Structures are given as structure tokens and as C-alpha cells.
Amino acid sequence: MRDRGRLRIAPYPPLPILRSRDPLLISRAELGTRNGVGISSSATEQLVPCHGLTHAEDCSALRSFQKVSKIMAKTGQQRFRLGLVLLFLWVLLQIVDAQGEDEFLLGLGELPETFPSDPPEPLPHFLLEPEDAYIIKNKAVNLFCTATPAAQIYFKCNGEWVHQREHTIEERVDETSGLVVREARIEISRQQVEELFGLEDYWCQCVAWSSAGTTKSRKVHVRIAFLRKTFEQEPLGKEVSLEQEVLLQCRPPEGIPPAEVEWLKNEEIIDPADDRNFYITIDHNLIIKQARLSDTANYTCVAKNIVAKRRSTTATVIVYVNGGWSTWTEWSPCNSRCGRGLQKRTRSCTNPAPLNGGSPCDGQAIQKIACTSVCTVDGEWADWSRWSACNTDCTQWRKRECNSPAPQNGGKDCDGLTLQSQNCTDGLCLQSSVYQLSVQPKVTGEEGFTSALGGDEVALYVGIIMAVLMCLIVSAIVALLVYRRTHRRFHSDIIDSSVLNGGFQPVSIKQARSADLLAATPDLSTAAALYRGPVYALHDISDKIPMTSSPLLEPLPLPNLKIKVYNTSGTVTPQDDLTSDLSATLSPKVTHSLLDGDPMTPRTQTLMRTRDPTCTALGSFNSLGGHLIIPNSGVSLLVPAGAIPQGRVYEMYVSLQRTESMRPPVAEGEAVLSAVVSCGPAGALLTRPVILTLHHCAHAHADNWRIILKSHTQHDQWEDVVVVGEENFTTACYVQLGEEACHILTETLGSYSLIGQSICQSAAKRIKLAVFGPVVTPGLDYHIRVYCLDDTEDTLKEVLQIEKQMGGKLLDEPKSLNFTYSNHNLRLSVHDIHCQWRSKLLTKYQEVLFSQVWSGSVRRLHCSFTLERQALSVCELSCKLCVRQVEGEGQIFQLYSTLSEDVQSIDTSLMDPGSSITVLSGPSAFRIPVSIRNKLCSSLDAPHTRGNDWRKLAHKLQLDRYLNYFATKTSPTGVILDLWEAQHFPDGNLNQLATVLEEMGRHDHSISTTAKEQ
């Protein structure tokens, strides 16, 4: 057959290759003849081994035989080629005879001078060369090599040929090139490597043959892998100060292959790419560039290779901090109220506090100075003067003065009467026995008292007075009879027309009549209009359109009403039932107090006058209830239906107190967790609890806090109302605490705030960080203000309003930070300042004292940074602001501002006080319709044997922290539903409530239908 221009002969079996350090060689052309492949004369000078021959004579005879074979092969090739030429000429003559010589030559054209032949076979090249290998324990390794084109392929190890039987050879033909590809594999055992003696390691090489020549692979080494157990040098523990460089040395144990080294910090791998404060040198040492408190840890050097893994002894690095004094507090008030005393101021070793064995602060923590206080003198009464002469009113007087001693330096005035009078005619004159006068007598004598009149004049005056009294009594009786006839058809003496129209008509307010009040029926509508407390806000029905055809008359019966008069001290004085004899039972003093007096306390009057419209909601409500909402503050007041008695209309309000004087004082370790919220009118009579909702800033689990609800008393003091989690039957309020909001159920309106006492150091409060800068900067300085606020909606809203007035703008989105009870300060610093700006701060950072942030006693706590630009033409500012608690959490602000643009970079829609609804009245204020609520109350209030009553409803809604509070109410289900309304305002999901009822086995399809309609 024809192959690459050579004649192939049936091959001989492969020659066995023996291990021999001095093998006899034969020519490669002879080896090619033996294998049945014709070799060109250019390859006859190369030699191959004489396999199986031990004497030189035998090898010479073999070579002679091979030369003869070579000559015969050449002769055969020449004859074969001559035959092919003759055959080609014969075929050509046959074609010429068939087509004609001219046509053939014309179609053939010019013939080439030479004919192409097959290209010579290339040298072998390796597709896969052997690689270095390691013997692990007693496991042998395999070496592989692949070459093409290859007639033979074998391994040579340490200068000796590997026997053919130790090879595993595979042969295939490459589909693309058509060349023969051979692959060889041998196995090297641990014993073979150990038997080798010499300086050089055990090595192997792959050799491949083809007709064109021989190709050798690279040398590869086979070694026995190991790793010693002992480190040449182990790291040692150290104690270093903050920001000091630390070097931990490590030299791993000897091993093949060499061990790789990594460092562990508290059993976690250190990656210098993640934390650039760490650096691992080329000789495996660990460098901490600047020691931080967080770098206090146990460090371990770990060496490993393919055999084993070794750990060094643990080196403990302790980063200590020397203590530093905080700033001095303000001088305390003098501890003596009268005379000499002491004032003191304190500082604490918390800037920073000593840690990890650091040295404490050097110096005194308390300073004291002497002080002197001016003594106060309380006033005392002098003796009474003698009685004056009897005057025309049958009265004599005497007086005394508060001058024994007089009050001095803020001392108290005398308590009691300055003037005293008595009847001087043994009861003949109808005057009070003893009373105080606010006017001076008209006629005075030598001692300042009126003179006595004659007996005839006294009798005349007594008769006139008796006649006037009789006329007044008769007039009062006539007025009473007329009043009873006018109001008999209503079965009640006092009617509020707002009951008939649902309370949505405007209140009719009339001015007090100037006529004698004893001669006519008192105008209670005027009294109610002037009185903003719990007295009935009654309307004059003559000014209203009668609604006798309204269906609301049937479900709302008009009861007999009672009036309770609240005096200025806040106590309640129940009066007699007012039926047909109302005008008779009201005394002139009571009438005057309702019409002319202001029953609200001075503190309530102050609150009403100083309310800020941006943080106050007002509304008038009747028995149908409603909802007051302060927009964007998280504060609202839910007045459930039935909380206001039938027939009454209250003008109610809820307000945020932003003045510093209204914030409750806190002791050490305490924190103000919410804003101070006032609701009123104070002292209003409620028949079921209202729900006051406000935001708080307590974070983490409630077990870390002892949260107290405090109330502001009439004496300008704060007192504890209830401790969350410690309620009992005597507590007047119930607090439902959520993650961000607090719901207070109370029947007493007033001012409330949440105070937190930290139980452990893991207690934390959320603070809001807001960064502001000026919109316009005419000079070189640029002031950055950083606010640290309690994380409630109202505090941020207040700061936004203030900054808008100041011409400021937000430089980045406000961010929250969890501030823990660790006594560590809040640290603020500016980094990466633009090259055309510089900081005017002399230190690296500023710190806000822990006590100021934790207590929350300062509402708008902030600090500022001043940056200076090189020229007025510089308009772009960029820097980073880092705010973090020392040894705690932190936040980073990326600040970028263009000074030439008068724009506001962050949306401040919170500053718009009218951005949402503030008052919802009647049924529209509640998600649950009245009919469904009544049905649920009637079915769940009664105890159930299987427990499917209001207790299970509270459990399903996660309102079962203190069930005894609900048990004391007339309708526990109603109070639970009210609390659910407050929790899920304004988008309460009725489907969720329907699902809960279905799980309880209470299937009410009306709730689901209502939810779909809404």
C-alpha cells in the first residue's frame, strides 16, 4: 500500500527495551527497516540499541544483515517507481487515441514540470508532558505523557529506560490531522524513590520516536512529601497601646512541598485585602499597622501543605487604652438654702475610659468651692387691730398686717385674711357673719373704718332687702314653671341637639346676658361654650333645624343627664340630678362660676395659648368618637365611640410640647424615650379609655429596659403612672409597646412621656443623624451641622423646620444609629476632604458626651465642623463624615455639595404641616363598621367554655401581655378592637382580622365583604 511516498511492510513485533547503562546501538534506519517502514538515506547515520545481543560480533553480524536489507529495499523502491511511470504513460496514450491528440493537448493545457509528493513526517511533539509529583505516605504516583506523531513512546528515569511491561500505552489516530497519537503512563512507588542514592532527586523523562527523529520532554521530579511538627519560630503575645504598630513573627516548620502560611484572629482567617490594617510579609510575619481596640484577640499562625496542617501556639494581643478626663460639668447650685454652703462640679474618666489594663486618669474627679446663699424670710401676721364702730351695714371691721416680719428674699407671704368683719347688731341685720372684702368702705373714720348708722336707717335698709329677696324668689318660681313646660316633651331637662344630628353641626355659642341671672333661667349653652372642660357643651335648640324624621332618633335615646362641676384644683364635685327643677338647684354662685369663671387650671390655659399649629391637632367630638392626628409626627389620639358620654360635645386636642422646660428630668442611667405629648381637655369625664399613640426610640429587647410612663401633675411635677410589665388592678393606664410606637390606654387626659431605665449594658436607643449645610455661602467658611436626635418622627420634623428657617439644606439622607448603654461617647470626624478645602478643627475628631446623647434631655443636640475653601471661586465640596459610638456602631455620610446652586438636595415634605388630614370624626374615623363591632362585642364579651372569647382574640392579635386590664372593662372586646384600630391606623387590614376570627371558629363574612368594599 501507498503511505507518504514509502512502501510499508508488515511490521515486526516491538523490540523489548531493557534497562542498561551502556546499551549497544544500531542505526535508526535499521530499526525503521525492522519495523517495516522504508527510511530515506538521510536518516541512515543514526543508531538505535542492539536489543538482546551481548557480544560485539553478534552486533556486527546484525549490522551487515541490515545493510543488505537496506540495499534490497532501495532496489525494490526503484522498480516500483519505474512501474508507476510506465503505467501512467500507458493510460495517457489510451486517452490520446480516444480523443485525438489535438483535442487532448488543448484541454490539458501546459503540463507542470514536476509532480507533488507527500510531505515528510514531522518530529514528535508532546501534547501532554509529565509534571512534578509528590508521594503522600505510601501512595504511589502516576506520570503521564502524550505525543504525536509517535511510533514509540517510553519513559526514562534516573538515566535508565523503564521496562516495557511497566508502561501503559494507548494509541489512537487524531481525527483532524490523521496522525498517530500515543499516550504512556508509569507508576512510581515510595520504595523506588527511597532506593535512589545520590545528590539529585528522583527524576523521569518521556521520549517519543517518529520517522523524523526523537523528542524528549522536560525532566520532572518525584519527591516524598512531609511536614515537620515543630515551628522554627512561633508568635509571642503582646500588650500594646492604642494605634501602636504590632509585629507577630512566624517561621513555619520544614516541609516538602514548602508550607503555606495563614493567620487566624479568634479562629477566623485574616485577609489583608478585606482589612488593610493587617499586612503579611513575604517571610510570613503578621504586622498590625495601627492597633485598634477591636484588634484585641488571640492570633494563631497556621502552616499547611498537601501532607498535613500545623498550628502554632496562640499569641494574645491586648490593646489597652489609657484613661482621659471628660470636660467639667457646670457648677451645681449651692447646697445650702441659707448661709454658707458648697458648690461642686464633676468630671469622669470617660474620654476615653481606661480599657484592658490602661492607666486610670490622674487627678481629681470632683472640685468644690464655697458659696453663700441669701436666706429667705417668710412673712408673719402682726396682731389684729381693735374693732371699728358699727356702720350702716350693721358691720364692724378689724385688720392686721403681714409685717412681723415681712417676707424677704423670696419668702412666703402670710396665709389668711387681712380684713375681718362681724355683725354688730346681734343678728338684726341679714349679713354674713364673717367674710372677706375686696373693696374699701366708703366712709371712714379716724381709724379707717365706717361709722355706725342710726337705728331707723338700719330698719329701713332691712325692709328694702327683704322686699327685694321676696321678688327674686317669686321670679325664680315663675321661670322654673315656664322652663318645665317648654322641655317636658323631651323627657329631659337638658338636651344637646348634637345628639340628634350626629355631632357634625357647628356649636352655637351665645354671649352671656346682662340681665339679672336670678330672675331668669340660666343659659347653659353659654356656660358650655365658655367652659372647655367636661361640663356639657349644650347647644341652643332654637338655632337648629329640627330633625324629627331622622332615623337617628330611634337608636339614640335621650337619657336624663347629670352635670359634674370641676373646680380649679381638678377635683370633681358631683351635683344633684338635674330634672325639672334644674334652675332651682343651681345656686347663684354656681351659675356665676359657669358663666364668668374659667374652670381650666392656669397650666391648661397656658398650654391652650402656646400651642404650635404645626404640632397640634384640634377637633370637636361627641359620643360617636373620632381621631386626632398630628401629621408626620407619629402622634395621634383615638377617641372610641362611646368614650364621650351621650349628649356631650368636647373640644379635644393633642399637642407636642417642644419647649425644654416641659421635658421630664432624668436621673443617671435614665433616658427620655419619647416626646412630651399633651391631650385634653384635662379633667374631662370619659366612659371608656382613649388611646394616645406616640413614637419612642428604645431599641433591642424589652428585657434590657425598665420603661416608665410618667405624667405631668398640676403642681408642675412629673410622677410615675405605670411601669410597663408591672401593671396591676390599681394602675390607671395600660401601655402596649411596639417596636417603634407606644399606645397608651387611659381615661385621664394630660401630659405624658416615656422614660427608660437601662437594666444592662446591652440596652440601646435609636438616634437619628442628620447633616445640614448652608444653601448660600458668601464667605470662605462653610459650616456643617450634625444633629444627634432621638429617632422619632417629630424630632426630625422639628429640625427640618428650624433648618429651613435658617437657610440650611440636608447634605445626605438622615441615618439611624443604635446607641448602647456602654458609657462611650459619640465620636464625629471628617475625612477625605477635597484638595481645595481644609478643616479648621484643631483635633482629629469631636466627641459628644455619652450622658448628653443617652439622657435625651437636649432636644436638638448637635455639633458643627468648619471647612475653609482656598478661594471664592471654589464651588464644589466633597468629604466623608464618620459618626460612631466609641467601641460601637457607626455611620458614614458621603457629602457632596455645589455652593453655587441654591437647591435643596433632599425632599423635606415633612416640613409642610398641612400635608395630611388632622381630624376624623364619627364612623369614618374607624376601619371596623359600628354594626360589625357591636356584633363582635356581643359574641366575644361573654366567657366561652372552649376559650373562644375575647381572651383568645387578644392572644391572636398579640395583645395578651396583661389581660386583667381588659377584664376590668365593660366590653373587653371593644377595648381590644380600639387598640387594634390604633395600631393599624390608617390602613388597617380587615382581611387579617377576618382570618383571626376564622381561626377562632367565628365565621363572619360581613368583615370580609367590608374589607373588599374598602
Image (tube, helix red, strand yellow):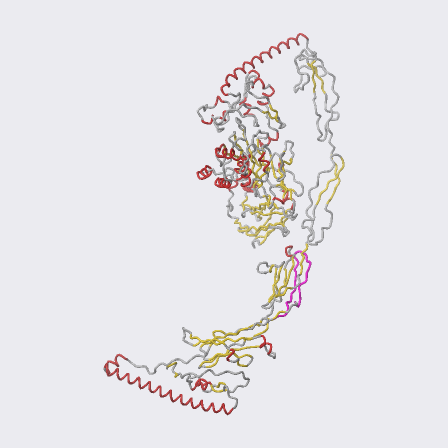
Please state, as top left, top right, bottom left or bottom right, where the C terminus lies in the image. Answer: top left
* Residue 245 in magenta stretch: yes
Return the x and y of residue 679 as percentages of the image width and height. 57, 33
Q: Residue furthest right?
A: 340
Q: Is residue 636 visible?
A: no
Task: Locate residue 509 relative to residue 407 in the image: left or right.
Answer: left
* Residue 360 in magenta stretch: no
Return the x and y of residue 794 as percentages of the image width and height. 56, 40
Image point 64% across, 10% down: which residue? 462
Q: Residue furthest front?
A: 945
Return the x and y of residue 732 as percentages of the image width and height. 61, 34
Name which quarter of the figure residue 859 lies in.
top right
Q: Nearer the viewer, residue 785 or 174?
A: 174
Q: Nearer the viewer, residue 600 or 641?
A: 641
Q: Nearer the viewer, residue 82 or 50?
A: 50
Name which quarter of the figure residue 341 lies in.
top right
Name which quarter of the figure residue 659 lies in.
top right
Which residues are drawn in magenta?
A: 231-255
Please state, as top left, top right, bottom left or bottom right, where the N terminus lies in the image. Answer: bottom left
Q: Note whether 765 is above or below 609 in the view shown.
A: below
Return the x and y of residue 890 as percentages of the image width and height. 59, 50
Total marks placed: 0
| Magenta-colored segment: predominant secondary structure | loop
Q: Note whether 532 is above or below 116 in the view shown.
A: above
Q: Is residue 444 visible?
A: yes
Q: Note whether 268 is above or below 130 in the view shown.
A: above
